[in-house]
Amino acid sequence: MEEKAVVTCFLRHGTEVLLVRRSGAVGSYRGRWGAVSGYAEGVPEEAARREIDEEVGLLDAVEFVRSADPLAVDDEGRGTRWLVHPFLFDCASTDVDPNEEIAAHEWVQPPEILARETVPRLWETYEAVAPTVETVAGDADHGSAYVALRALEVIRDAAAAAAATGEGADAVLETAADLRAARPSMGVVRNRVNRVVAADDRDPAALRDRAASACERAVAVDAEAAAEAAARIGERVLTLSRSGTVLEALRRADPEAVYVAESRPAREGVGVAEELADDGVAVSLCVDAAVGHVLAEYDVDTVLVGADTVLADGAVVNKVGTRPAALSAADAGADCYAVCAQDKIVPETDADLESGPPGAVHDAAGAFDVLNPTFEATPADRFTGLITETGVLSPEGIAAVADEHAALAERAGERTGADGGDDGTDR
């Protein structure tokens, strides 16, 4: 059997991926749906980027997420073993410029793959690079809005696979429990997963459809929260860490100047500064310890931060450095807002704060303790307000949303058992 190496590239926008229908100009699988693909000539990632550029014209809009080991796909009829190199890219644009190899294209939720006539084993190829509980747990580069979208994708895809094979919901519910435990400081992951599993219908197809709807809803409310923030910030803004909602708000507002704290030790603020600069925003990057100085000396009028979780009393759990930025904003007479979707509000009034590995700060080798807190809680009264998709939320509004999420968690617990696992009963 002849072996041929190819690349298959899944471009993801929000929680949808690009599917393309192969035209009569290609040599194999004409009329079938696939992802952007082509022969893996040379280095596979270089071939992947070349195909994205040639087939759909989106190379400038993509960011590499991950790849996987090649998947052997045997086509006995053709006498060919395809060695498929899977790739996943996030894509900032949906403006496809197809070449002659593409007869049609659509942005769809990935489970749609299972309903179409596709190139061989396209779903398995997608699964090789799709989000997992492990990638959700290990993502140290993105804010909680992004991570929560990936968590919804995990449960959506698990339910889709179970529905396609006729399996029960037990494995899907176990996945839901694992996702809730994966990021304890990110209440949005728990709330959004709970919304999928809390309903009475536990059929995998119903879970799949609810998760797909939750994906669409999450993208919409995050964008609405960004729009509300954009309408409230001033011309000179300081931010820290990496929040997709904050980034979108800054792009919409187009302020005169943005100051970004680098956010050690992972320094995710550097990437934020680079992205904003690429968008033409006037950006200044500073070390974390200089935040107070920048606020006092550069006429900053707004501090805008994201929120990984908002507690029922209004305290904001976010990347360490948020509290000193809020305190410095008050000293400088600047507004200080946190922005997030209401799904980030939790019933608790204390938080399980994550810490990073000590070695990321210093290899002390036992000589002394190294503290590397990742998150901290900043009291509500340090903020001018909490901006959500419905505008600035009052303390009473925050408490009401927290109560709603408590009820949601209780219903989800009834479906998945007190320990987060399936309780084995039918409802």
Image (cartoon, rainbow, N blue to C red):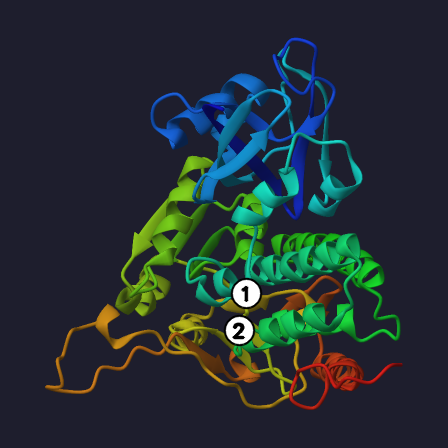
Amino acid on which the number 1 mark rests in the picture = Val
Q: Position of residue 296 (x, y in %)?
A: 34, 66
10 Å crowding of disc 1: few (<14), some (14-19), many (20+)? some
Q: Which mark is residue 133?
A: 1
* Relative height, residue 249 to residue 36 (above, below): below
Q: Alpha carbon of mark 2 to alpha carbon of mark 1: how far?
A: 7 Å
* Residue occupied by mark 2: 182
Most foreground residue, 357 or 263:
357
Is residue 92 toward the left or the right of residue 192 in the image? left
Q: Quadrant of residue 50?
A: top left
Task: Give me the residue at 54% from left, 56% from top.
Answer: 246
Q: Position of residue 158 (x, y in %)?
A: 68, 59
User: Cβ–Cβ below 8 Å for labels 2 and 1?
Assistant: yes
Task: Give me the residue at 75% from left, 43% from top.
Answer: 114
Amino acid on which the number 2 mark rests in the picture = Ala
Q: Position of residue 184 (x, y in %)?
A: 53, 79
Point out the image quarter for the C terminus: bottom right
Extreme left residue here? 367
- Residue 303 visible in the displayed image: no
